[in-house]
Amino acid sequence: MSPAHLDRDFDYLVPPEFDDIAQPGVRVRIRFAGRLVDGYLLRRLAHTEHTGKMVKLERVVSAERVLTPEILDLATAVAHRYAGTRADVLRLAVPPRHARTENGGSAKKSAPDPSVPVEDPEFHEQQRDSGDHEASPHTLDGSTVENVPGATEEAVDGISDSADLDDDDRVARQRSVASPADAALADVGIRGVGSASAGNAALPGTETSDAATANPDHPAPAGIGTSDPVTFDPEPWDRYVHGRAFLAALGQGKGVRAAWQALPGEDWARRLAELAATVVGAGRSAILLVPDQRDLDRVLAECTLLLGDSAVGLAAGLGPAARYRRWLAVLRGSARVVVGTRAAVFAPAADLGLIAMWDDGDDTYAEPRAPYPHAREVAMLRAHESGAAFVAAGFARTAEVQAVVDSGWAHDLVADRSVLRKHTPRISAPGDSDLALERDPIARAVRIPGIAFAAARSALKEGAPVLVQVPRRGYVPALACTKCRTPARCRHCNGPLALPETRGGRNDPNAAHSPSCRWCGIVEAGFRCPVCASRALRAVVIGAQRTAEELGRAFPDVPIRGSSGGALLDTVEPGPQVVVATVGAEPTVRGGYGVALLLDSWALLGRADLRAGEDALRRWMSAAALVRAHGQVIVMAEPSIPTVQALVRWDPVGHARAEVDSRAEVGFPPAVRLVAIDGSTEAIAELLSTAALPDHVEVLGPVPLPPFARKPFTGDSPVEVERMILRVDRREGAALSKALITAQAIRSTHRTDAPLRVQIDPVDIG
């Protein structure tokens, strides 16, 4: 159940007619507090410790055992780690059921989804034609049993034909019956999609009923370990110290753990596919985690080349049918390599041999829904519990990964400095020496100094493309008073004023030049500074569109391409051109860029965030890695800043080690366990008053919620939200989580509607 005080197992009787299909891991419908709710059957027991009246299972939704023992144990561990409930974790781990897909029925023809990779239809057809599907759903009195999440008791029996509807019709019908049930269940403190469980033992090994002849563990899928070994050239791994030995250990099924720093220009997608192929060749499965859809498509394409249809992609952008079909392929064992975004860390891969994660510093790995787990922490927890290998890969390194390397849990997988020098482009900052300042005294003061223009002209003359990275999209996304530097704000909503793009072009006489509000869109034709009454405005940040316009004037005969926001470019063709891209949107080019210019470094380094330096280095290295080995990278930043020096030396490990030491000195993660409690003053006080906190916990605050942080759900009440910080040594982190779980369980019995959110080790601290 989702309420914290109901996060436990409940015992139900299994009627004789369900004896064959009511096996551990199936979805069930049970009656709880007078309402029908969804749940999972955890265990079949011969006896119960419950002395009261036993209620029977209403129905078994499907014979598919979707909740494996490993995922159940992982969900329990994640809930304990992040002070949440198993129901919330299982919503992230197990996708909603799609009856037609699960039963092997034919899908309706529809227009192709651009977010689905091209190979997806062929994969679907092969899955529908395969023999790995379960039998038809169990029937009672001739009617098909279907799962209808959120349906009312009266509506359940009337919509068993919903499998014949397409996705849009199904969503519409579910919405028509979901709201009344959710509202009714909210009155008794139970949500309609809560996770009830049958059986009172959550761990394997307990006594099972005589009627339950199936093994409580999920049956081993067919095909694992029966395929021919996958062959590839392992020579690229020789560039890394102990790289070949690491591959050999994976092939032997060992649970090795490494922090892999990829060389600049490395075909990292191919290397990850080779790691997965090595594990599959040993008869095990692998999970590869990537930040976004673009990286997913790239890695999946490489895995498909090596492994064929045994590799599938899982992402939120897929439709419900496609996503559930792929998820079932993983559950049933026909897919042995999973490439996906953060939710794929819960994929039910059988005999898991490897979890690899690319660019774990990306903020998309942080789950925005309760209990707010981070995919990196879940991956390490799963690898530790299952004995699988773990790889944290990237061009840069986070402090969290460096901390586990320092602890000995993982080891470095890096290249020797001599090899690194051969593959790294020349990186410099303007004015990094007295001689450079003598040649160009204003090199540090201007946005694009002369040395940058000279390097770009030289690369374009050689026929090589030039990459220009900017931190902000738009034209002039931020304005300020020219006289007193006060940020320009809208008079109507207090939103930031920006100069929009001139849609008609810079030579259009009718183009609007007045600033407009980025929130409400109202044009501010007569701006006057509220501090000094000046009417003059200046640009605080130059966006990607304005940068492209300026570069177009500087290089009139060269194509200027943009990549940002909705106009994202995956690749560009080789040739003389200037590519202006926002951070994270840099396209790849065959042969690499000749020059990369990293502009407006202060916008990344100057953020009021704990991870500002770490994130800036990660974004710079991702762009610099696209430059060819004999190319040049120029970062427009103060050369003496440690983060800039780490980029110039290409030393992500040293920067991460220094970051860990500096955070330990001031008491920030990963050196400590940090808890952010957001809510109203009354809600926070109520929670802390019932929590038996550890003796050495440090309570900081309350302070106003940071402006960038998302507020907890407050309904229609305009309540003021505050933040309280709890800090404790990592050795007492488990005790703090347990205390908060107990306190939230007590609070949930009060049925209060005051907003409250508990986040452990949040990415944004404020």
Image (spheres, rainbow, N blue to C red):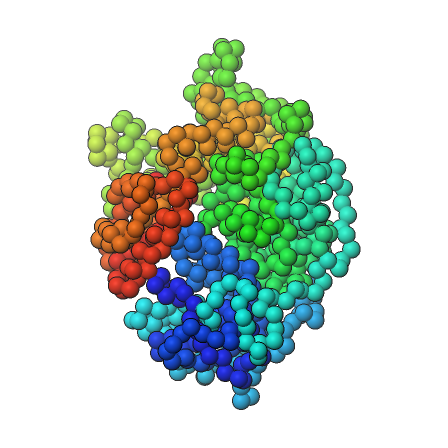
Image coords of residue 291 (percent x, y): 53, 47
Relative to 9, say whether 591 is above or below.
above
Residue 375 against residue 196 in the figure, above or below: above
**Image quadrant for the N terminus?**
bottom left
Query: Going 47% across and 24% down the picture, which residue do you hit?
Result: 642
Residue toward you, 645 or 191: 191
Q: Quadrant of residue 666?
A: top left
Residue 574: x and y in percent read 66, 37
At horizontal 54% and vertical 20% (from top left) the residue drawn is: 451
Residue 235 appears in view: yes
Give the answer, above or below, for where 489 lies relative to 416.
Answer: below
**In the foreground, 77 or 476:** 77
Question: Which quadrant of the view contains residue 309?
Answer: bottom right
Q: Quadrant of residue 560?
A: top right
Residue in view at x 44 percent, y 17 percent: 442
Seen in the picture, residue 607 relative to 680 is either above or below; the reply is above
The percent coordinates of residue 639 (x first, y second) are: 48, 21
In the picture, which quadrant includes the C terminus? top left
Q: Position of residue 614 (x, y in %)?
A: 47, 34
Is residue 521 shown left or right of residue 208?
left
- Residue 603 in view of the camera: no
